[in-house]
Amino acid sequence: MKTTTRIATATGALALGLTALVAPPGAHSAPPAPSPIAPKIPGKQINHPKYSGYVDVTNIRMVGRTLRFNVRFTSTRGEVPVNRLNFSALARGTTYKFPTSNLPTRKLSPGQSVGGSLSFQVNNGPRPTLIIYKCDCGKTLATWAVPRGKQKPPPPAGSSGSSQS
């Protein structure tokens, strides 16, 4: 009886060992849990202990002596504060503050978005090279370079932006 038990145990162990060698990788493990796919949100991610989300600055351009750009906030956690006064523009030795804007001052709950346009009047000062977004406590959360030279306007919606000649 002892010999039969040893042979059966040895045969079972050998069968399990061979199965492990022949079976494809992962055949004996549980399938991995599906990873949640986050939607693509444009802009730079902002992280603060109380909130997080995205700020997207687009269509940055100089129009005469005015720096203009569009901005869109999207909240993903907490209440993201939206305030035009959190933006400034930096030039050689000069910081431009207090932009004019149609951006509403408010707090966004997770999943909410809001956008608007901002502009800084440069007058006779140096040309801005950087747009800065800071939280209410003064910490810089994101920056954007101001393109040099003349910018082409964005192509019309639905257009590829290239021309066929």
Image: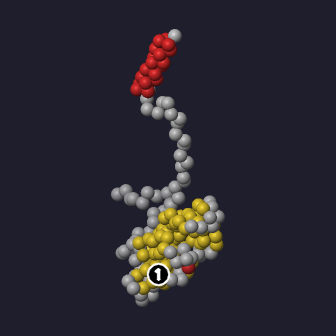
Disc 1: which residue: 66
Comparing 57 with 25, the one in front is 25
Quarter of the image for the C terminus: give it: bottom left
Query: What is the image's colouring?
Result: secondary structure
Q: Quadrant of residue 126?
A: bottom left
**Count of labels shown?**
1
Residue that appears at 55% across and 48% down: 36
Q: Secondary structure at mark 1?
A: strand
Query: Mark 1 is on which residue type?
Result: Thr
Q: As drawn, which residue projects farthest toward the bottom?
A: 124
Q: Quadrant of residue 116?
A: bottom right
Left or right: residue 84 versus residue 124 is right
Q: As drawn, which residue projects farthest toward the front?
A: 2
Residue that appears at 54% across and 43% down: 34
Comparing 137 with 153, the one in front is 137
Residue 77 x/y as whole percent: 60, 62
Residue 149 x/y as whole percent: 36, 75
From the viewer's perspective, is residue 124 above or below residue 150?
below
Residue 64 x/y as whole percent: 44, 82
From the viewer's perspective, is residue 23 above or below residue 93?
above
Residue 35 x/y as whole percent: 53, 46
Q: Residues within 10 Å of mark 1 (few under 14, many from 20)?
A: some
Asked whether the viewer can see residue 38, the reply is yes
Comparing 7 with 64, the one in front is 7
